[in-house]
């Protein structure tokens, strides 16, 4: 069939292989991230962040069910209230995170590596939920995750980014030991 | 006779496949072959990287969409 022939040819095409099939090198990724985070800072006035957006999503969902976060310490600043009042459509971080999700989907589809992965055991479920809760909670009380606090901190020449790096490295060492001990 | 060990690491995220491969290779004899089944694309990078550095023969085969077999011959 002509269609099949076409896709077989695409599969062998050197540009397809280079741009869509094989992973970029770490250097290519680093350069792209750097350029794009500068664009983010220039166009939105805020450094790149990921996890803070989820707190806003949570607040919007809570408000959609009639709740109010006006009195919550985390959202008590004027700036935070203004962002919440403006809504998700006017929130650059939300669009960016949605872009990350669909961009990742696009990349995996283009490489024909899309797969719905099975859950292997109960341990995996417990670890995923526990890990997610701890990461989310930790990122909020630290006012940032490995992007907002670490990456954007260091690229803004802020000492706080380096302090975060030391803490995260220590945490990763302990986490890896726990992983090998309880998860292998 | 060389042994063949198959590890099903499908559905497991990094670094679980890598640590499983490292543990398995430790128990194997020179010439034995380890077939590691993975569906986490970063394991396709870090497992061969480690194995080659450790001096083994490595081959990666794409067996299905988003599914690979890393074949490691202990050297």
Image (cartoon, coloured by chain):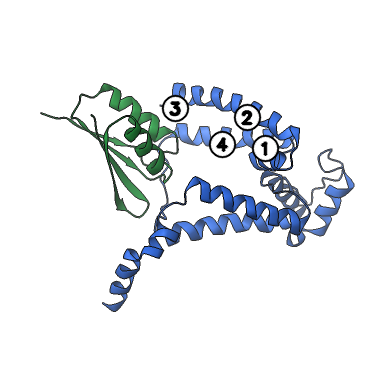
Chain colours: A blue, B green
- Residue under numbered circle 3: A183
Could you classify mark 4 by the number of other residues whose Cα lies within 10 Å: few (under 14), some (14-19), or many (20 or more)?
Answer: few
Q: Position of residue A6 (x, y in %)?
A: 32, 74
Chain-order first, disc 3 or disc 4: 4
Q: Nearer the viewer, mark 1 or mark 4?
A: 1
Chain-order first, disc 4 or disc 2: 4
Residue in view at x 69 percent, y 38 percent: A154
Quadrant, the C terminus of chain A: top left
- Residue under numbered circle 2: A168
The label on residue A18 is: none
B51 or A79, which lies in front? B51
- Residue under numbered circle 4: A129
Kindly indicate whether the residue at mark 2 contacts the one at mark 1 (C-beta within 8 angstroms): yes
Could you classify mark 3 by the number of other residues whose Cα lies within 10 Å: few (under 14), some (14-19), or many (20 or more)?
Answer: few
Kindly indicate whether the residue at mark 4 contacts the one at mark 1 (C-beta within 8 angstroms): no
Element marked by disc 4 = helix
Q: Nearer the viewer, mark 3 or mark 1?
A: 1
A127 or B63, which lies in front? B63
Q: Estimate the spatial distance between the alpha carbons at disc 4 and disc 2, rounded to whole Å.
A: 20 Å
What chain does mark 3 sit on?
A
What chain does mark 4 sit on?
A
Q: Position of residue A160 (x, y in %)?
A: 74, 33
- Pointer 3 and pointer 2 on the same chain: yes
The label on residue A150 is: 1
Q: Nearer the viewer, mark 4 or mark 2?
A: 2
Quarter-of-image position of residue B71: top left
Q: Estimate the spatial distance between the alpha carbons at disc 1 and disc 2, rounded to whole Å.
A: 9 Å
Q: Is residue A119 visible?
A: yes
* Up/down of A124 relative to A31, above or below: above
Chain-order first, disc 3 or disc 1: 1
Chain-order first, disc 3 or disc 2: 2
Q: Estimate the spatial distance between the alpha carbons at disc 3 and disc 2, rounded to whole Å.
A: 20 Å
């Amino acid at each position: 069939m002509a269609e099949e022939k076409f896709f077989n040819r695409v599969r062998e095409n050197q540009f397809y292989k280079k741009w869509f099939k094989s992973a970029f090198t770490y250097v290519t990724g680093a350069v792209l991230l750097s350029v794009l985070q500068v664009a983010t800072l220039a166009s939105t006035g805020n450094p790149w962040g990921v996890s803070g957006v989820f707190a806003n999503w949570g607040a919007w969902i809570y408000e959609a069910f009639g709740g109010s976060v006006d009195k919550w310490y985390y959202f008590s600043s004027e700036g935070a209230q203004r962002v919440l009042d403006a809504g998700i459509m006017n929130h650059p971080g939300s669009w960016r995170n949605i872009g990350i999700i669909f961009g990742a989907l696009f990349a995996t589809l283009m490489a024909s590596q899309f797969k719905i992965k099975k859950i292997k055991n109960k341990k995996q479920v417990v670890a995923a939920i526990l890990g997610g809760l701890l990461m989310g909670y930790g990122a909020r009380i630290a006012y940032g995750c490995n992007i907002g606090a670490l990456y954007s901190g260091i690229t803004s020449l802020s000492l706080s980014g380096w302090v975060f790096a030391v803490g995260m490295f220590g945490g990763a060492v302990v986490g890896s030991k726990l992983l090998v001990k309880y998860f292998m | 006779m060389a042994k063949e060990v198959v590890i099903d690491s499908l559905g497991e995220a990094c670094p679980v496949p890598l640590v499983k491969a490292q543990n398995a290779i430790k128990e194997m004899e020179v010439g034995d072959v380890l077939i590691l089944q993975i569906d986490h694309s970063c394991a396709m990078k870090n497992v061969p990287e480690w194995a080659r550095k450790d001096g083994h023969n490595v081959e990666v085969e794409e067996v299905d969409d988003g599914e690979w077999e890393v074949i490691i011959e202990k050297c």
